[in-house]
Image: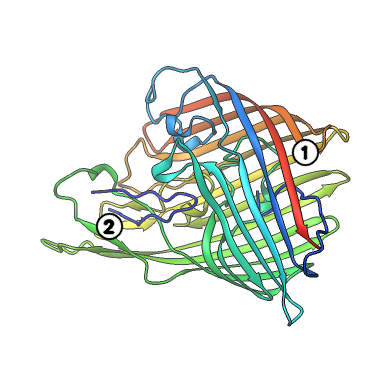
Amino acid sequence: MTIHRNSRTTTSLLVLAASLSGPAAVAQDTGTESGKRLDLYGFAMLDMGYQAGQNDPDWFDVLRPTKLPAFENEFGDDGHFFAGVRQSRLGVKGFLPTASGKEIKTIFEFELFGTGSDAGQTTFRLRHAWGEYGQWGAGQTNSVFMDGDVFPNTIEYWGPNGMVCFRNVQLRWMPMQGENELYISLERPGASGDPGVQSGSPELPELRARFPLPDLAAHYRMNRDWGHFQIAGIVRHMEWDDINPVPFDASGDATGWGVNLSGSLKFGADTLRLQLVAGEGVQNYMNDATVDVGATGDADIGEALPMVGVVAFYDRTWSDDWTSSIGYSMLDIDNSAAQDPSAFATGHYAVVNLLNHSVDGLMWGGELQYGERENNSDGFSSDDLRIQFSFKYNFGYSWGSE
């Protein structure tokens, strides 16, 4: 049996068995047609550091609890130096006035962080290909189930493991915008499955995933001077078909759902960022999770796995030149009965940093990172301690008038 795993930008089959904002561009009026504007933005970024432990080498420059060892020395001996430029980014935003008085807004953005078949590589990867006109938006961008403003001011690329963080292809309706938001979306479905302890058995049914319906997501958000509050929900339907239903038909289905409560509180120049998410079978919307469906070992074949995610970070501004972020995140998955004892169950993530912003367009600083993985039922756990230094050089330019 083949197991297909979902990534941030590609939706794999279910086989069971920063936000849109870029560095601020400097507005320039070049005398083009009134109201039209094109913003070019991005940054070049170096990350380097040392990890005291070990992890999957395809994810050498990020801290993901799911990629920590599932057994002793799975990835060799401890202690690794790492360096890369994979966070570097390039984007373009367009603003086009129309006769109706409404703007067409577009964004096209790439970075260099390879995932999926390009995991571990420095390669162009699409982040956003998105357009909006009035109440409607279409393309690929942050899921409506996600709150990008929960992401803290940190330099570790992947971010809090218990955060909803997924850029998805979608059609979005936005009947309320501004101080109060109501967004509803139909999003591309996809999920992954774990056949459990029978993985590799010739007697295991040959299953094919099928997603007859799009994922349905919605959120309501209040934007205020004190911060913001958002409540989001999602529901989805997943099916798997047995292509050789002899001696028995192992076809089945599962319903996934999730509720995400998130927000921020401002204390002068400081910000507290919080999120609590719970659900079943929506793991591919999480920032660092494993499978959506697990084998049960009985006639039901598989079930949507329950999970809970937590994010709590405090961004501190010490002065015009120095900032810090400190916080914790956790993801806990309730494994199914037939999953392997070494399957991922719980991940912990913690970060503290000190960053300098004394030169406009330049950020540099250091960060201490800690992650831990706990297995399903074999009692094994692993952890990793890292120190990372990053240097980020922004660029931006605008053509047209605001």
> Image quarter for residue 29?
bottom right
Given the current orientation, which residue lies at the most extreme left position?
247
Q: In the rendered structure, which disc, 1 or 2, sits on the residue that comes first in sequence? A: 2
Residue 301's disc is 2
Using residue 310 as the reference point, say whether residue 335 is left or right of it. left
**Rendering coords of residue 273 (x, y %):** 72, 47
Q: Secondary structure at mark 1?
A: loop
> Image quarter for residue 369?
top right
Residue kind at label 1, given as amino acid type = Gly
Which residue is pictured at 51% across the width and 26% down the height? 383
Which residue is pictured at 57% across the width and 49% down the height? 110
**77 vs 197: above or below:** above
Find disc 1 in the rendering and name its residue.
Answer: 361
**245 vs 311: above or below:** below
- Residue toward you, 206 or 198: 206
**Marks 1 and 2, how far apart at CA:** 54 Å
Given the current orientation, which residue lies at the most extreme bottom position?
100
